[in-house]
Each structure stands twice: as C-alpha cells, then as structure tokens.
Image: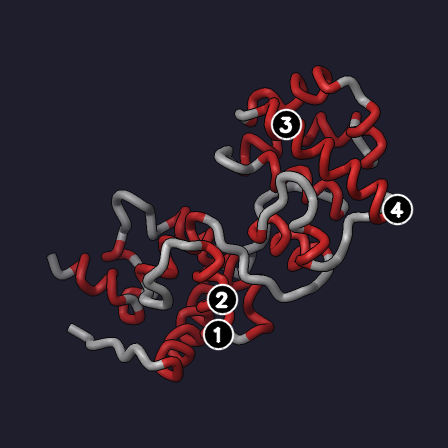
C-alpha cells in the first residue's frame, strides 16, 4: 500500500495529478444550476440549500420567467414567491433570504449583484459557498466552492482533515493552483456524484484511486 506524504509540496503535486485526471474524466464539469445572470445564479444557489440541483432547475425554469430583477422579488407578494419555490423545501426561509438579499442589492448596490466576497456574504442567505459560486461562475474570480462533495472528497484524498467549510476552503487554496480552484471544485462534484458516493464509494472503479489514501484503504478491505 502506498504511503502518502503529507508535506505541502507532496499534497500540491498529488493535487495537480488528481486535477489532471479528473479534468480528462469530466471535461464537461461545470455548475449544474441553470442560470443566465449573476442574480439568477444567486437565487438558484440559495434555493439549492438542502435541495438537489435538478429540483432547483425545474423550479427556476418557471420562476425566472416571472422574477427577472431584484425589484420583482422585493415587490411581489411574499406568498407568491413562497408558492413558486415551495418544492425546494424550507421555502419560507428561502423566500425571506431572497427578498432580503434583493433588497440590499437594490439599496446598497444599485440593483447589481456585487462582485466581492465581503459584499456578497453581507446579503441575506449568502454564505461563502454561494458567494464563491457566483464569483467563480459569473465574475471569473477563481474560487474554491466547498459543498458536501468537496468536504467528503477533500478529506478522503487527504487534502484536509477538517469538516469546517471555512478551514477546508483555506487549506485547499494553499494546495490547489489558483487558476484551478473553480474547475477543481466542479470536478469533485461530478466525481462525487458518479463514483465517490458518501455511503458506498466505488473505489474499485475510481480513476484516481492510486492518488487517494481512502480509496487504497477501502479497496484493500
């Protein structure tokens, strides 16, 4: 069994190899949410909390035809918005967050979605994950998007030992080349969905098993 070195240099070299293989395996890896503007992605990402991207995409197909601007969300009857997003779960809280975020976008940013981490996380319902998604996808700012797949695979690959998203983000930023941050995040999502499942990972079929401490241990059982 391979002994994986845990020096920063060794992690960086292994991360580069992991990225190369995953990019070849998932050349189409990108954000799974359907959107056409920063506002749409912001709203979709808020809706995606504890909900599948597939379900969110079904809901937003209709939602985005009715709600096109921050003013639409703020001025609409709250019940109308809640009913439109009901199947995403936690619809009352999500509606409250969306309206609060849009109100601040109007009052502080003139109706435009802000372009910095500090300004984005000041919006209701927006944490670092959502902010990084918007920054990486809409504004070309390299961003590590720490979702459940990133947490799981980051730990299994030995790139982090934490379950804290903020710590994981910081650690991965040190290991991954900056220009790969956004795309690496998407590759982990695709690989997590296809192979590295939470309960029954298919380590025997994994293209990066030789680079993964967890995979080698699991396959040897």
Residue at image x 25%, y 61%?
215
User: How far apart are the two marked residues, 4 and 1, measured between alpha carbons?
Assistant: 35 Å
User: How far apart are the two marked residues, 3 and 2, measured between alpha carbons?
Assistant: 33 Å
**Residue to which mark 2 is pinned:** 170
- Crowd around label 2: few <14 · some 14–19 · many ≥20 (10 Å): few
User: Is residue 43 rendered to the left or right of residue 93?
Assistant: right
Q: Are marks 4 and 2 in contact (CB under 8 Å)?
A: no
User: How far apart are the two marked residues, 3 and 4, measured between alpha carbons?
Assistant: 27 Å
Mark 3 or mark 4: name the one nearer the start of the chain: 3
Mark 3 or mark 2: name the one nearer the start of the chain: 3
**Residue to which mark 4 is pinned:** 110
**Residue to which mark 1 is pinned:** 174
User: How far apart are the two marked residues, 4 and 2, measured between alpha carbons?
Assistant: 31 Å
**Residue to which mark 3 is pinned:** 59
User: Is residue 14 rendered to the left or right of residue 73?
Assistant: left
Q: Nearer the viewer, mark 3 or mark 2?
A: 2
- Crowd around label 1: few <14 · some 14–19 · many ≥20 (10 Å): some
Position of residue 167 relative to residue 32, above or below, is below
């Amino acid at each position: 069994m391979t002994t994986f070195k845990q020096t920063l240099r060794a992690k960086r070299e292994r991360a580069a190899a992991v990225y190369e293989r995953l990019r070849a395996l998932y050349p189409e890896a990108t954000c799974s949410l359907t959107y056409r503007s920063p506002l749409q992605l912001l709203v979709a990402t808020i809706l995606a909390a504890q909900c599948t991207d597939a379900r969110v995409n079904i809901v937003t197909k209709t939602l985005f035809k009715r709600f096109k601007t921050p003013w639409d969300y703020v001025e609409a009857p709250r019940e109308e918005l809640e009913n439109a997003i009901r199947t995403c779960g936690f619809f009352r809280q999500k509606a409250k967050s969306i309206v609060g975020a849009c109100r601040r976008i109007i009052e502080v940013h003139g109706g435009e979605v802000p372009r910095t981490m500090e300004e984005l996380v000041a919006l209701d319902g927006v944490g670092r994950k959502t902010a990084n998604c918007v920054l990486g996808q809409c504004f070309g700012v390299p961003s590590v998007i720490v979702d459940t797949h990133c947490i799981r695979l980051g730990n299994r690959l030995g790139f982090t030992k934490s379950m804290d998203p903020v710590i994981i983000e910081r650690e991965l930023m040190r290991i991954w080349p900056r220009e790969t941050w956004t795309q690496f995040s998407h590759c982990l999502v695709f690989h997590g969905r296809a192979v590295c499942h939470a309960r029954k990972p298919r380590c025997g079929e994994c293209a990066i098993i030789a680079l993964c401490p967890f995979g080698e241990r699991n396959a040897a059982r």
